[in-house]
Image (cartoon, helix red, strand yellow):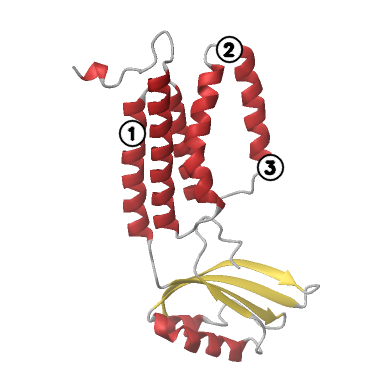
Amino acid sequence: MLDGIFASLYTTSVTAPVFLAVCLLSVALGLGIALVYRKISGEGGTMISALTVLPFLVQLVILLVNGNLGAGVAVAGAFSLVRFRSAPGSARDIMAIFLAMTVGLCCGMGYCTLAVLAAVVTCILLLLQGRQAADADARDIRVTIPENLDYNDLFSDLFAEHTTASRLLRVKTVNMGSLYSLHYRVTLKDAGKEKELLDAMRCRNGNLEIACGIPAEGRQGDML
């Protein structure tokens, strides 16, 4: 009995009612994926629009190349160009885009039940993972120090007092090697005392530049 549920809606030909129904389903699933992505990432803009439209576009492409080898090769070449014109994203961004393409592929081949199942299960997993990974007290701190200071234990006592965990992610020389730029990932004991920590660090680095922000997931080296 369940075999018919997972069968393709497209048989020998594509009728207008079935095509319109599948189009509406792909757009609805794309909108659902976009809303879930917005909830777990807190981001909007073009990414939301792209996730909404992407399943519909992939569905149309699959319908056009169905059984046409030449069109399939041409589309594969066009998709490969999109990769090199896109900025690198986090693992969460890539997963959302891949899910949208998977849903569009399922809809384009008529497997609507699989499309709904893939979208629902993956979105639930993303929501659970996003809730577990959320840490309101996590901060990325980038601090500039003079080259004559030893950065190994420069802020150890301050981090021990104000944070529950801290680690040095990256060290980079700036200003022709006269300064060091240190990138830390810390978890604050009390988010309300963030300014107190930064003020104490300013006394250690000679009041040079300090940047503090929420960690950008998947982009450890691109904070601020």
Q: Amino acid at mark 1?
A: Val
Q: Label 3: how many residues lie within 10 Å, few (<14), some (14-19) or many (20+)?
A: few
Dividing the picture into quadrants, the one containing residue 199 is: bottom right
Of the numbered discs 3 and 1, the one sitting upstream in the chain is: 3
Which residue was labeled with disc 1? 116
Which residue is label 2 attached to?
68
Q: CA distance from mark 2 to mark 3?
A: 27 Å
Helix, strand or loop at label 3? It is loop
Check if mark 2's residue and mark 3's residue have beta carbons within 8 Å: no
Q: Is residue 146 left or right of residue 140?
A: right
Task: Please state the horizontal and vertical placement of residue 133, each as a whole percent of the image.
Answer: 37, 59
How many residues crowd mark 2 within 10 Å: few (<14), some (14–19), many (20+)?
Answer: few
> Is residue 137 in sight in this rendering?
yes
Distance Cα–Cα, label 3 vs label 1: 30 Å
Query: Mark 3 touching mark 1, by CB under 8 A?
Result: no
Residue of label 3: 85
Query: Image point 43% across, 15% down: which residue?
Result: 14
Which one is closest to the eye, mark 3 or mark 1? 1
Q: Is residue 110 visible?
A: no
Residue at the right extreme? 176
User: Which residue lies most toward the front here?
Assistant: 16
